[in-house]
Amino acid sequence: MAAIVSRLERASTRAAPRRATADSPALKWTLLTLALGFLLVFLVLPLVAVFAEALRRGVGAYLEAFQDPDTFAAIRLTLIVAASVVPLNLLFGVAAAWAIAKYEFKGKALLTTFIDLPFAVSPVIAGLIYVLIFSAHGWFPPEAQQVLFKPFAAASGWLASQPGFLWLDPLAYWFEQPKIIFHTTGIVFATIFVTFPFVARELIPLMQAQGKDEEYAAVTLGASGWQTFRRVTLPNVKWGLFYGVILCNARAMGEFGAVAVVSGKIRGETTTMPLHIEILYNEYLFVSAFAVASLLALLALVTLVLKSAIEWAHSRRHA
Amino acid sequence: MKLRLFPVLAAALAALSLAPAAHAQRAARPVELLNVSYDPTRELYTDFNRAFAAHWKKETGQDVRIRQSHGGSGSQARAIIDGLAADVATLALAFDVDVLHSRGQLIPADWQSRLPHNSSPYTSTIVFVVRKGNPKGIKDWPDIVKPGVAVVTPNPKTSGGARWNYLAAYAYGLKANNDDHEAAKKFVGDVYRNVPVLDPAARGATTTFAQRGIGDVFLAWDNEAFLALREFPNEGLEIVVPSISILAEPPVTVVDKNVDKKGSRKVAEAYLKFLYTEEGQDIIGKHFYRPAVSEAAKAKYASQFPAITLVTIDEVFGGWAKAQPEHFGDGGVFDQIYRR
């Protein structure tokens, strides 16, 4: 919200010198009231309501909501999912943006279109695709997964049995009995699907606008590929990258539809925060439901503040 | 010198896949059970699981952790077939368990004879919930098809309770029209014409009616009805008992293929048997389900259940195997009347 307010302020100061010649003050104030009123009714009030409902029975009851092991597990799972999804999408986003912006190849338009696919496809379908592929009667059922992963299971099992490598045991266990659907893995897959455009979408226009000249210069001066990327490309797209990562993270934590389809709703095991909020709400535990919702909203607010900070820092650099 | 990495790795992996899997010592995990159930049993099983875990610990000294998953009965059956690793399935009606055999090959055909009382540790029925003071004067089935009465019931395609609702309405339609099926279909069609929203599962419908304030009459499991009254004491909701309703028998089963794979058959079977003990039946009664076997629990909770004429699915509809495709299958009676 802070971002929008600051943007509004910026807009209004910019409009000020034109006031005498163009828009009437009445129009300006009408538009401003309309925008702020809209914001108040549809954004601020619901947000306030979430916190008010969460704190209705006092801070004690609010904190008690987080004592529930299932709530704790939901928060943990949400963080695990975000921590797995964001780096993967960062990698993919940079690779895709680089390929699209810096190279000419056949099917470039197609790739660009495909990156936008998750924006166009309903999250429910994203979830169902994975059910179709990985479920017991899917194209790639658990039995087939077990056969395919057998060498990996053996390798990681052997490695985990070596001193100092015990931490690899969960991985070995997963390879031995691969679980995708109704498991954290499936939730991560579905979340990757719905969040993968965020980083790439931010980077592509930025990289395209910057062109290849600076990279050419670096290469001419004898820089290696990695040096060029780290010293020339990365600093140029840094802010876009941050911005994409933040949006990707926000969506990864908040996704409901796609995750609901692949989750199986096993409490304390495959329920992320958004799913857990729905469960609590449906069990008449309104204070707990809104307490968890307020935490999720807080995460979103932190994200938004970070985003504004980055915008601010960015605009100062270019001012 | 450049090592050719790929062939070396491939050879190593191939060698390892032949070797017996060497394992790090895995700490013995406590036994885990996953109970995949229908929507309104959340509170029942939260309570019951606690009691069973204590019982099992006392009997065997072993810790058992029971996980729960709830949703519309039909969708839950679908999830189990798709690979949700349920040790026990406790669903709203026998047909949804039958598909675990017919479509999933997860349980034997004779699953229902493995436990007493058709594998149904409790029964339930369908009643009406109306708003404070019953402003629309709803007393029986004919009142809910009147124009201007909004009826809340979930979607029979996904919810088990909704199918019982539908069948109860149909049974009334038959009785009121001398067993004329066309007239009964018309009556049920009139009921669904008054439904503003079909929730996917029973609990969603309860919140639609009680929390969001939509509708004049809510067709509900009687346990959901009692729960709604208790959770929303300020709403002044009232239960109306219709002249005729249906005897619902929600069955339970061990999912054989899953427990044999996991090695949890013993504890899973004990879990279901515990539902039939005095302690289990008492918890069932406490949560407004009707105990099926324990005379003591039946007597203790008899007063909380209204007397009501109940018909069974076997006598009116010829059992679930016949009723499900006929009424709820693709292009079945429900599809015909809901489209009309």
Image (spheres, coloured by chain):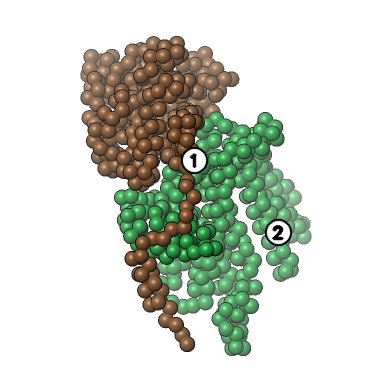
Chain colours: A green, B brown
In depth, the one of B330 and A25 nearer the eye is B330
Q: Earlier in the sequence, mark 2 or mark 1?
A: 1
Say which of marks 2 and 1 sits in front. 1
Left or right: A192 as drawn, with respect to A66: left
- Residue A215 is at least partly visible in this image: yes
The kind of secondary structure element at disc 2 is: helix
Question: Where is B38 relative to A34, above or below?
Answer: above
Secondary structure state at the residue bearing disc 1? loop
Residue under pointer 2:
A309
Tag shown at residue A257: none
Give x and y (percent) for residue B173.
29, 19
Residue that label 1 marks: A267
Residue kind at label 2, given as amino acid type: Ala
Residue drawn at point x = 34 percent, y = 46 percent: B261
Residue B310: image location, x then y, percent: 32, 16
Q: Amino acid at mark 1?
A: Arg
Question: Which quarter of the image is occupied by the C terminus of chain B?
Answer: top left
**In the image, A312: left or right of B110?**
right
Residue at the (33%, 39%) spot, across then down? B255
Whether callout 2 and callout 1 share a subunit is answered yes
